[in-house]
């Protein structure tokens, strides 16, 4: 069994529980997260946070970036950046 989102099932024209044949190929391309400039600046001001962030997996880096990019106001974005840096420092310790 391979989980598939409702959006992808709909695009493929299949329903939950349908049996289908699929070909699976490994994705060997490197995954890179585009870090927003304001978050990059905050990381650059703190070497420990930067170092820890750089060591995270693609998924964990993406989690931080998506949270920041999802902010609806500049104030929320700033708070989320500060929180991310703080969390990265806590994890580093």
Image: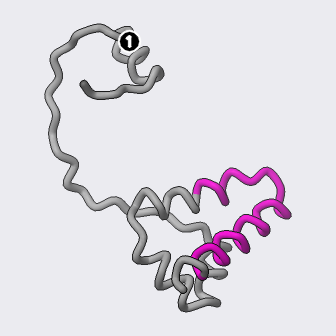
Identified at 58% across, 61% down, the residue is 65
In magenta stretch: residue 73: yes
The location of residue 13, given as percent across then percent down, is: 36, 10
Q: Is residue 50 left or right of residue 59?
A: right
Indicate the quadrant containing the N terminus: top left, top right, bottom left or bottom right: top left
Q: Quadrant of residue 75?
A: bottom right
- Left or right, 5 with respect to 46, comes to left
In x, y percent, where is residue 17?
Answer: 33, 10
The C terminus: image quadrant: bottom right
Query: Along the line of sight, which residue is nearer the eye, 64 or 12?
Result: 64
Q: Which residue is mark 1?
A: 16
Quarter of the rendering containing residue 77: bottom right
The picture places residue 86, in percent across and down from the top left corner, at: 67, 77
Q: How many marks?
A: 1
Numbered disc 1: secondary structure = loop
Give the percent coordinates (x, y) of residue 89.
60, 82
For the point 29% across and 8% down, the residue is 18
Residue drawn 17% across the image and 45% down it: 26
Which region shows up in magenta?
A: 66-89
Q: Is residue 17 above or below residue 83?
A: above
Q: Is residue 92 above or below residue 10?
A: below
Between 90 and 45, the one nearer to me in the picture: 90
**Residue 74 among those drawn in magenta:** yes
User: Residue at (52%, 83%) from the top-left corner?
Assistant: 92
Badge 1 density bin: few <14, some 14–19, many ≥20, Cα 10 Å? few
69 left or right of 7 in image: right
Does 55 sit left or right of 50 as displayed? Answer: left
């Amino acid at each position: 069994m391979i989980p598939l989102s409702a959006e992808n099932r709909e695009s493929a024209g299949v329903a939950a529980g349908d049996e289908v044949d699929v070909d699976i190929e490994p994705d060997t391309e490197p995954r890179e997260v585009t870090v927003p400039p304001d978050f990059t600046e905050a990381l650059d001001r703190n070497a420990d946070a930067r170092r820890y962030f750089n060591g995270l997996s693609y998924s964990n880096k993406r989690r931080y970036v998506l949270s920041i990019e999802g902010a609806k106001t500049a104030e929320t974005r700033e708070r989320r950046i500060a929180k991310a840096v703080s969390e990265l420092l806590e994890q580093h310790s």
